[in-house]
Image (spheres, grey):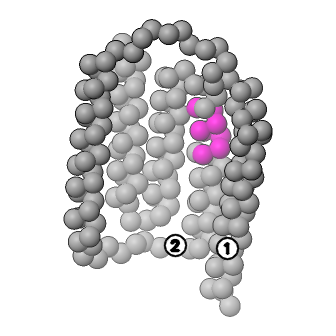
Amino acid sequence: MLHLILFFIFAAVCIAGAINLLAQSHPINSALSLIVVMGSLAVLYLLLGAEFVAAIQIIIYAGAVMVLFIFVIMLLNAGVEEHSGKSYVAWFIGIPSVTVLVGLAVYSLVLYQEKSAPAIGPDPLLGSVQEIAHLLFGKFLLPFEVTSVLILIAIMGAVVLARRGES
């Protein structure tokens, strides 16, 4: 019962952080809201029993990637965004899309409640650190390295854009 209560609390924190991320007009405040979302997701992973994924969520995403985002935002000296309020396309596409997504989520939850899953014991190697390492540095080595090169290119692009404004 405690797990369920904690799940709903941190799910609400995650949703509130995501809404705050979208509502902020200053990029630094949005990045800090994203850190709140990442932290609450890590707690949700802990509640699901995925300790390694929770630790990676904090170390890699909330730590390294968000520091990189904040560094780039500060390097570009991004100011407060101005909202015109005239984005009618966002209203006509966004509201029906959100309605459909919420409807699908509710339908999925109701369908899941009707069909109970068979009781199968957990696989002790499923999601272990060794299995993740073998997948990450074996089967998915190329996408892992391509991602690191793309992040390096993004940093170099931010530096070039920041220097262009100085001269």
Question: Of helix, strand and loop, which mostly describes the magenta segment?
Answer: helix
Q: Three-letter amino acid code at disc 1?
A: Gly
For disc 2, the marked residue is 78
Question: How many numbered discs?
Answer: 2
In the depicted structure, whether residue 20 falls above or below residue 155:
above
Distance, label 1 to label 2, CA atoms, is 15 Å
Q: Secondary structure at mark 2?
A: loop
Within the image, what quadrant is residue 3 found in?
Answer: top left
Specify whether 157 is left or right of 8: right
In the rendered image, which quarter contains the C terminus?
Answer: bottom right
In the rendered image, which quarter contains the N terminus?
Answer: top left
Residue 111: x and y in percent read 27, 26
Task: Identify the mark nearer the N-term, 1 or 2.
Answer: 2
Residue 136: x and y in percent read 72, 39
Residue 67: x and y in percent read 63, 54
Within the image, what quadrant is residue 55 found in?
Answer: top right
The residue nearer to you, when weighing 88 against 116, is: 116
Identity of the residue drawn at 58% across and 45% down: 62
- Looking at the image, can residue 165 be seen? yes
Within the image, what quadrant is residue 16 found in?
Answer: top left
Asked whether disc 1 touches disc 2, contact meaning CB atoms under 8 Å apart, the reply is no
Identity of the residue drawn at 60% across and 46% down: 61
Magenta range: 54-61
Q: Magenta includes 59? A: yes
In the depicted structure, whether residue 87 falls above or below residue 115:
below
Residue 135: x and y in percent read 72, 35
Identity of the residue drawn at 50% across and 61% down: 28
Q: Magenta includes 69? A: no
The residue nearer to you, when weighing 135 against 22, is: 135
Q: Three-letter amino acid code at disc 2?
A: Ala
For disc 1, the marked residue is 157
